[in-house]
């Protein structure tokens, strides 16, 4: 059975923190592939940039070229309305019944997991891989059996920070891959 890690997000823009999460999950959980799942309309976030879904998809595609185990899964970009993870997992399980899916999140997201739409159904359908983050102290015994917490190198970076520093012309370009940085420059994103 193929073991697939799902890394969802707005990826506005994708950055090296996402890469660290994907690779740590792949290596430590022995996943066959990581599918990057860009959201169309995340239900919990207010859109704060002018990037299009195509801009974000192009940036994610450039990230997936870094490792042959990385793929783009555009299922949420094809959905209408808000992107609820439970609906995404239902569709993936229907389309790939022989695959095992693992949803990768940061420890900060674990704090709100119980508030996600359909979280009980979600926890029954998919296993979660939680990457430890500085400042969070969830213990293994506090989590559901379908949740595995792993330690990995993490950096305190966010897409919001990157957008803000681009706007302020103070971006540390090493927080992005060369390919994503080039796309942002070519298209004048976040200026």
Image (spheres, helix red, strand yellow):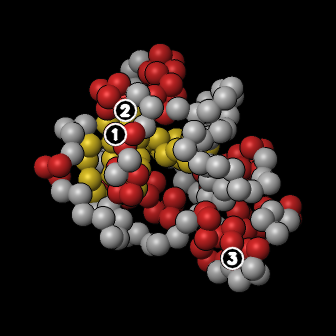
State the CA–CA distance, disc 3 to disc 1: 32 Å
State the CA–CA distance, disc 1 to disc 2: 6 Å
Q: Is residue 66 visible?
A: yes
Furthest-bottom residue in this view: 170
Determine which residue is flagged by label 2: 119
Residue at image position (21%, 39%) is 144
Determine which residue is flagged by label 3: 165
Horizontal side of 71 relative to 178 (left or right) equals left
In primary-sequence order, the first of circles 1 and 2 is: 1
Mark 3: few, some, or many residues within 10 Å (few <14, many ≥20)? Answer: some
Residue at image position (74%, 43%) is 53
129 or 80, nearer to the observer: 80
Secondary structure type for disc 3: helix
Secondary structure type for disc 2: helix
Residue 154 position within the rendered picture, expressed as x and y whole percent measured from the top left = 41, 69
Residue at image position (85%, 65%) is 188
């Amino acid at each position: 059975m193929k073991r697939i890690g799902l890394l969802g997000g707005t990826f506005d823009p994708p950055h090296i923190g996402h890469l660290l999460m994907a690779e740590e999950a792949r290596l430590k959980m022995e996943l066959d592939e990581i599918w990057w799942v860009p959201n169309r309309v995340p239900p919990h976030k207010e859109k704060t940039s002018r990037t299009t879904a195509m801009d974000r998809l192009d940036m994610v595609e450039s990230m997936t070229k870094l490792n042959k185990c990385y793929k783009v899964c555009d299922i949420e970009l094809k959905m209408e309305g808000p992107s609820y993870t439970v609906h995404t997992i239902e569709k993936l399980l229907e389309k790939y019944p022989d695959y095992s899916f693992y949803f990768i999140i940061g420890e900060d997201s674990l704090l709100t997991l119980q508030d996600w739409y359909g979280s009980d159904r979600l926890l029954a359908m998919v296993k979660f891989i939680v990457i430890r983050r500085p400042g969070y102290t969830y213990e293994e015994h506090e989590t559901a059996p379908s949740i595995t917490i792993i330690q990995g190198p993490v950096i305190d970076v966010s897409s919001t920070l990157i957008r803000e520093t681009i706007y302020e012309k103070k971006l540390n370009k090493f927080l992005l891959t060369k390919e994503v940085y080039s796309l942002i420059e070519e298209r004048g994103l976040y200026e």
